[in-house]
Image (tube, rainbow, N blue to C red):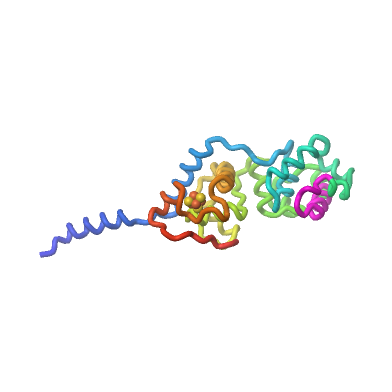
């Protein structure tokens, strides 16, 4: 006679042993490790007000934060309002930021954006995504960073780096940053979004670089994927 109870107990034990974590369990582990690794986190881009933060984020496209800070430290003491950039004009802005990639396009955006801020927004940086994303050179990621770091509103700006880490950690299988942002917002509590965004950026820069690792060495991946044997290949956004 087959002992059904015994068989079910055995099956449950085996299931527990091989059970694969779901994305919420992985998110919890990621959050715990990031909090231990980066208990305090600073905003990497230097600025002196929301306007200069917006300019710095715009300048940081395809450029390192260190490079942006090195350039802006000579600009912001003197020029830190839209009026200042209108007054000096596009050519002078180009000169000031010429050590930064695609500086001509960025100078044009800074100049036009400053004009719009003055004519439409009383010289202030607007506080809605729609208005921010209507400014020249400002996409959803830039707007999200300003919302988060400038206004303290919960946002989860996702760039290619955050997209890469979220995939390696099994928090998304999204093929693009839009889907990844949606998935991350579902997995983490709103009040932690701003902090997590920075923690993930720092972790990516320090440990989880684009070419250096494929999900087999450090604690986050070995805890979330103890059975992973082959390199994990990220889907490009
Ligand atoms: S094991 Fe590799 S992919 Fe996973 S978190 Fe560490 S560095 Fe990133």
Corner quadrant of residue 118: top right
Residue toward you, 23 or 33: 33
Q: Is residue 100 above or below residue 44?
A: below
Residue 122 or 5: which is nearer the viewer?
5
Q: Nearer the viewer, residue 74 or 21?
A: 74
The residue positioned 10% from the left and 65% from the top of the image is 1
**Residue 26 visible, this angle:** yes
Q: Nearer the viewer, residue 55 or 129?
A: 55
Q: Which residues are magenta?
A: 96-115
Which residue ends up furthest to the bottom in the rendered image? 1
- Percent across and percent down for residue 39 are 52, 36
- Asked if the magenta segment contains residue 64, the reply would be no
Residue plotted at (51% across, 54% down): 213
State the image coordinates of residue 162 (x, y, percent, origin top left): 57, 52
Q: Is residue 110 magenta?
A: yes
Residue 149, image x, y percentages = 65, 41
Q: Is residue 187 at all visible to an observer of this figure?
A: no
């Amino acid at each position: 006679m087959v002992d059904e109870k015994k068989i079910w107990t055995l099956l449950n034990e085996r299931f527990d042993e091989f059970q694969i974590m779901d994305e919420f369990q992985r998110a919890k582990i990621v959050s715990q490790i990031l909090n231990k690794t980066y208990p305090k986190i600073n905003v990497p881009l230097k600025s002196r007000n929301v306007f200069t933060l917006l300019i710095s984020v715009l300048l940081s496209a395809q450029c390192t934060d260190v490079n942006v800070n090195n350039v802006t430290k000579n600009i912001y003491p003197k020029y830190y309002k839209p009026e200042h950039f209108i007054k000096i004009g596009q050519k002078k802005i180009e000169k000031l930021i010429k050590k930064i990639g695609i500086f001509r396009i960025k100078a044009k955006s800074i100049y036009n954006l400053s004009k719009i801020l003055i004519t439409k927004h009383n010289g202030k940086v607007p506080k809605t995504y729609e208005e921010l994303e209507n400014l020249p050179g400002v996409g959803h990621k830039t707007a999200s960073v300003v919302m988060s770091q400038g206004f303290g509103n919960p946002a989860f700006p996702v760039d290619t780096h955050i997209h890469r880490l979220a995939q390696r950690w099994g928090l998304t299988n999204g093929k693009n940053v839009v889907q990844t942002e949606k998935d991350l917002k579902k997995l983490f509590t709103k009040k932690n979004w701003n902090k997590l965004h920075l923690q993930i950026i720092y972790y990516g820069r320090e440990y989880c670089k684009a070419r250096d690792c494929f999900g087999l060495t450090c604690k986050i991946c070995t805890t979330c994927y103890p059975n992973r044997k082959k390199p994990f290949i990220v889907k490009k956004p």
